């Protein structure tokens, strides 16, 4: 894979000057490549202050579309190339962005419109049939939509549904049970359902692999241990890891953060609602500065 540079430009309102609308553009660069290398391999980012893009703004209203050429507002003294080069020297190590591979991920979904339709139907029946007093439990249990809600909380029914899903994707069905049941898998417990498992102890880290990485961060790290439950945060020293993905209760992946000013060897700690993992000799990460090649 060659070195690639992609820029996502997001327009943000920045006020009005006279009759002209000002737009600030948030530029988010994404650098691609096979392996970490010097910034020199991504020339557009390296020389960003010297680049003068031609900006266009497209405004749509109904079937009407207007394309306007923007005028870049440049400081009187120009852009500060020297500061840019100090912040991002040509020899700075860059770890290319690698998107998370979700091609094999199983996706659970539910028909939102159908859920809303069935809930509205149940509410309408209750309001029209019980204007002055609450309906009895017997009356509710005789309603088809309420029956489907109860069935969607039954572990046996949910197990059968999950077995069908394991055979491959299914089209949305029109019955209430097929609309409500997926919610149990996606959101866990609702009133009347069994609560999902929760950790009773704080997490423990038993291994960090790899246990070294460049000071610029973004090293993919696998952490193993115990009691890894969402919501979860991972600290390298005092800095938060990024792209944290819990694979199971004993394994998670993340990217190391950029090293702090004095960071060399730091403690890796995992934090959940039950507390933070203790400091351990098995939970260390060492930053290093890449040498010349």
Image (cartoon, rainbow, N blue to C red):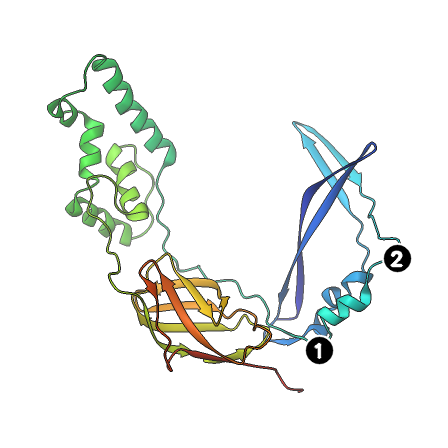
Q: Quadrant of the N terminus?
A: bottom right
Q: Is residue 149 above or below residue 284?
A: above
Residue holding disc 2: 77
Residue in the foreground of this view, choosing between 38 and 280: 280
Residue in the foreground of this view, choosing between 105 and 129: 129
Residue in the foreground of this view, choosing between 49 and 183: 49
Which residue is farthest top?
132
Tell me the crowding category of disc 2: few under 14, some 14 to 19, or many 20 or more residues within 10 angstroms, Cα based. Answer: few
Q: Is residue 210 visible?
A: no
Q: CA distance from mark 1 to mark 2?
A: 27 Å
Which quadrant would residue 65 be assigned to in this image? top right
Q: Is residue 112 visible?
A: yes
Q: Quadrant of the C terminus?
A: bottom right
Residue in the foreground of this view, choosing between 186 and 87: 87
Position in image of residue 57 (x %, y %): 74, 41
Residue drawn at x 44%, y 63% as measured from the top left = 244
């Amino acid at each position: 894979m060659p070195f690639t540079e992609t820029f996502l430009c997001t327009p943000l309102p920045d006020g009005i000057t006279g009759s002209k609308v000002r737009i600030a553009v948030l530029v988010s660069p994404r650098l691609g490549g096979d392996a970490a290398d010097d910034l020199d391999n991504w020339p557009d980012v390296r020389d960003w202050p010297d680049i003068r893009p031609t900006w266009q703004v497209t405004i749509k209203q109904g079937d009407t579309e207007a394309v306007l050429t923007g005028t870049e507002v440049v400081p009187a003294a120009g852009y500060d190339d020297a500061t840019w080069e100090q912040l991002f020297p040509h020899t700075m190590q860059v770890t290319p962005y690698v998107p998370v591979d979700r091609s094999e991920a199983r996706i659970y979904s539910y028909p939102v419109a159908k859920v809303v339709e069935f809930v509205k139907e149940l509410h309408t029946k209750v309001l029209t049939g019980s204007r002055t007093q609450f309906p009895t439990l017997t009356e509710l249990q005789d309603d088809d939509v309420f029956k489907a809600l109860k069935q969607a909380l039954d572990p046996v029914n949910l197990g059968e549904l999950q077995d069908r899903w394991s055979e491959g994707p299914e089209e949305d069905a029109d019955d209430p049970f097929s609309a409500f049941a997926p919610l149990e898998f996606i959101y866990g417990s609702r009133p009347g359902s069994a609560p999902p498992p929760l950790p009773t102890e704080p997490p423990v880290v038993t291994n960090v692999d790899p246990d070294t990485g460049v000071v610029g961060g973004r090293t993919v790290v696998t952490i193993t241990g115990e009691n890894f439950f969402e919501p979860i945060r991972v600290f390298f020293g005092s800095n938060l890891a990024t792209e944290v993905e819990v694979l199971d209760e004993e394994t998670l992946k993340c990217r190391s953060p950029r090293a702090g000013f004095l960071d060399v060897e730091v403690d890796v700690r995992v934090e959940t609602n039950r507390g933070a993992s203790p400091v351990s000799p098995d939970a260390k990460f060492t930053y290093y500065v890449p040498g010349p090649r």
